[in-house]
Image (cartoon, helix red, strand yellow):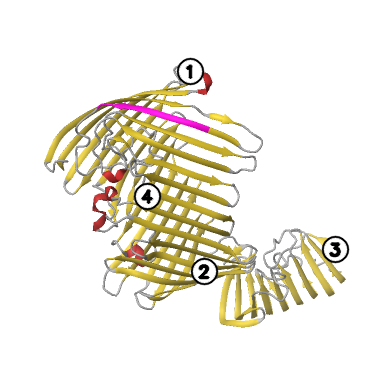
Amino acid sequence: MLFAPMPLFAIGVNANEPKTIKSEKIEYDVKSGAVKTSGKTEITNASGQRMTLTDSYMSKNGDNMSGKDVQIWLGQHVYIKSDNITHNGPDTIAKNAEFTACDGCDTFGNAWAIWASKITHNMDERMLSFYNMVFKTYDLPVLWLPYYTMPDPGVKHKSGFLMASFGSTNKMGTQINIPVYVNFSDYHDATVTFSYLTKENPLFQLEHRLNLSHAEFRTRGSFTHNKEGDNRWHIFNNDKVDLGEHARASVYIARTSDKTYLQKYGFFNSEPYLDSGVKLELFESSGYIVADTHDFQELREGNWVQARLGGNILPNIRGVYQTKPFFKETYATFGTDVLGIVGDGTMAQRMVGDARITSPWTLWGGNRFTVSLDARYDVYNFDNTIMIDHSEFSGLKTRFLPSGYVEWGLPLVRPAKSWSQTLEPRARLTMRRRVDDEQFAENNDSVGAFLSDTVLFSDNRFSGYDLWENGTFADYGLRWAAFNPDGRQVEVFLGESYDFSEKVTDPNSGFHTGRSDYVGRIGFSNSRWLTLSERFRFDRDSFDLRHSETSARIGRGQTYLSLGHIWAQQLSNIGSRENNTNESTVGAGLRLSGRWSLQVNGIYNWTEDNFLKHNATLFYNHPCYYFSIGYQRDNAVRRDYSGNTTFQFRFGISIDGQHY
């Protein structure tokens, strides 16, 4: 046995690591420093990589090396086996060799292996080159290539071709995706993908990534010149830069050439619109300031006209500051909002100032009272803006809205070893100045009010800033909850609102003069494999169901069933179709074995009696390779897009946990 700080003996091994050499006979030439072994020889370095061979020769500096019947172990399951190996400078050359990363992964053979008449490893470039190679699966040849290269297993990042993926659609035919990975450094890379389509012109995709110590930059995009002669494209960009402990800047870009490109080419995620802009955030423990801009691109069709954005936002500045308690737990909050909207030849600027004092108290018997006083002042500057009475107006308008509320709650807790319970009645009386003009302009950032359990006990029941909540109203409800030491929880809430003044809102909103509809929620979770949730609204007079949102998840890990259903009666106040909303979603995952799994998802519209979208994907994850087969059907009809059926196949090999 000989211990010596000898140089590189095999692929991927550090030349300066000490070696352990075991052999039937070892000859060491003191003058030249060369080592010769006879018979079976095993060489192991400090990192655990080892080589077995017969009749070896190694020069002093490791520039020259040779041997027969060689096996080089590069990882736990990775080795090269060769009839003959020579080492000359940075090159290690193996003749009639086999490379695999699947040794011992399956009892009946290697899942995959590459046989080649010659395998060359260049240590300077850290690349493996295969000549006259045959790709085999469980010793069956499936692919021949005259030449193939790949990084050695010790390389984290290396430019080159990635594994191709295949797909097929009923609109654009077969799609072959050929990705090329480009590595600039350990923190900077990109992926360029060329997609060949049999029924459409090629598609080009780019994904760029850059990570710095205090910033990250992400860009995705695509481009095609289709057979109709149109340039179609998209770009999604999201950059974030930390400007210190209390500041951050962001740039976000989302744009596409037209309304249906994202959906037709598979980049669509049901976005109603795309939003681009910049953002600056300043924050500390007691306050924050956010300044951002928004430039919107509408993707919806004409039936969404009531919900369309009224223009681009340049700029939007929001700031909030909360003081330390004056006495007890009483504190003040100051807020401001500056907004500019530009669009269709009109312009409007808004400045909102808001000051609030909040004083929470806990009194005898556990009674909790919160008293709050608020003053808000709005200043609007309009330029050629269409007002609510359909007239055109330019000039200033102002509003002043003082308000306050008193809220009471009494949590009644009953602890127990099995199930601990909480019963909490809660009520809030909100008093606001009654004004006739709830809004000025026809296009604003609000789309009305919609009653739900989340709206009760909120400061503003309307969405956005431009619509004002008028008059005096009360919110009240009862919450019961229980939990046990095993983590199981159950909750029930029922509540209502009461308007003391005349209410002018869409009747579908759930608000009325006097009592509103009833709203509530029911939830259960055992913290392991079951979660149930139901939100509902019942008519105040007939007790008919007006709105229902149900969700459930059963199972854990890769085996689960998720269900969702929404039913709502004529939600015309948010710009939807006049038909009732009646839609179900289902998702399921099934772990068929340790390596096989299946996922299916679907969205079904009961009103139109068809699936809006459904998909299924079969996954196989082997320690040495992976693949998936997917199917998706989209039944949407929008302009030049009229539904699409897509099949996709992905395959890749794994080497010591890294995907190739």
Which of discs 4 and 2 lies nearer the camera? The answer is 4
Numbered range of the magenta stretch: 423-433
Quarter of the image with the N terminus in it = bottom right
Say which quarter of the image contains residue 193.
bottom left
Mark 1 neighbour density, 10 Å: few (under 14) some (14–19) many (20 or more): few
Seen in the picture, residue 365 relative to 211 is either above or below; the reply is above
Mark 2 residue element: loop
List the residue tagged with mark 1. 328
Q: Amino acid at mark 2?
A: Leu
Mark 3 residue element: strand
Camera-side residue of 398 and 128: 398
Q: What whole-number distance in Å separates the C-alpha atoms at marks 1 and 2?
A: 63 Å
List the residue tagged with mark 3. 2
Camera-side residue of 85 and 228: 228
Q: On the rendered structure, is 652 left or right of 89?
A: left
Which of discs 4 and 1 lies nearer the camera? The answer is 1
Q: What whole-number distance in Å separates the C-alpha atoms at marks 4 and 2?
A: 28 Å
Q: On the rendered structure, is 392 left or right of 315?
A: left
In terms of sequence position, does the residue under pointer 1 or pointer 2 come before the other?
A: 2
Q: What whole-number distance in Å separates the C-alpha atoms at marks 3 and 1?
A: 78 Å
Q: Return the mark for residue 398.
A: none
Q: Amino acid at mark 1?
A: Lys
List the residue tagged with mark 2. 162
Q: Amino acid at mark 3?
A: Leu
- Tell me if residue 54 can be seen: yes
Residues at marks 4 and 1 touching, judged by CB atoms closer than 8 Å: no
Residues at marks 4 and 2 touching, judged by CB atoms closer than 8 Å: no
Q: Position of residue 316 (x, y in %)?
A: 30, 39
Q: Amino acid at mark 4?
A: Tyr
Say which quarter of the image contains residue 521.
top left
